[in-house]
Amino acid sequence: MKSNTVKMAALLLASTALVAGCGKKKVDVLPPAAEGTDYGTQPTDTTPTTGAVVPGSQEDFLQTVGQFGDRIFFDTDRFNVDTEDQATLQRQAQWLARYPNTRITVEGHADERGTRDYNLALGERRANSAKNYLISVGVDASRIQTVSYGKERPQALGSDEQSWAQNRRAVTVTVQ
């Protein structure tokens, strides 16, 4: 009986040592990003030698329209463009007038409340509202695409009014 206990203890000790040696290994090099994407890469909107912002790039767009000038916000269950949003979209239209070959995508977003289908539809209406305003001030419709992410890509995580307010938005992104 004592010999079985010693064997069991030895087996337990060996298995513990074996499991301890199976810890996570540090990954030095990540696999390459999928072809056609820029996931995990650094922004390339600057020239490599001077570090200057490339005219017509997303970085140039953000510098010109302001830090949060690429987005407009909406009230709960709404998709109307208010006066403050109009000013933001007007700045975007002025920038787009300077770069007539640059195309944009307007992304529509919603907060976490509501069903997936409802939020996708609401995000689409928000993106289209921003698109329609840009068209009304002279931006060619063929330069603007829309996409709805619904509640799938929140800006702020949290289940409170402050987080929800940040997630009810339409964001303009330049397309290269």
Image (spheres, grey):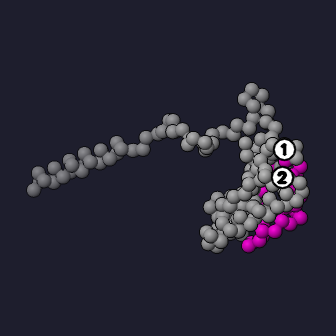
Residue 170 percent location from the top left of the image = 75, 60
Q: Is residue 79 magenta?
A: yes
Question: Can you identify the residue that label 1 sits on?
Answer: 100
Q: Which dot marks residue 140? A: 2
Residue 64 percent location from the top left of the image = 85, 45
**Left or right for 28, reference 12:** right
Q: Earlier in the sequence, mark 1 or mark 2?
A: 1
**Left or right for 21, reference 9:** right
Does the image show residue 113?
A: no
Q: Dot 2 surroundings within 10 Å: few (below 14), some, or many (20 or more)?
A: some
Residue 49 percent location from the top left of the image = 74, 26
Three-letter code, disc 2: Asp
Q: Establish if 143 lies above or below 161.
A: above
Q: Toward which corner of the image does residue 55 lie, by quadrant?
A: top right
- Which residue is painted at 81% across and 55% down in the image? 141
Total labels drawn: 2
**Left or right for 40, reference 43:** left
Residue at the outermost top position: 49
Residue 140 percent location from the top left of the image = 84, 52
Residue at the outermost front position: 142
Alpha carbon distance from label 1 to label 2: 9 Å
Q: Which dot marks residue 61? A: none
- Which residue is painted at 62% across and 70% down in the image? 117
- Looking at the rendering, the stretch of residues picked out in magenta corresponds to 67-96
Q: Considering depth in this image, is 94 or 113 the residue closer to the camera?
A: 94
Asked if the residue under mark 2 is in contact with the one under mark 1, i.e. CB atoms within 8 Å, the reply is yes
Three-letter code, disc 1: Pro
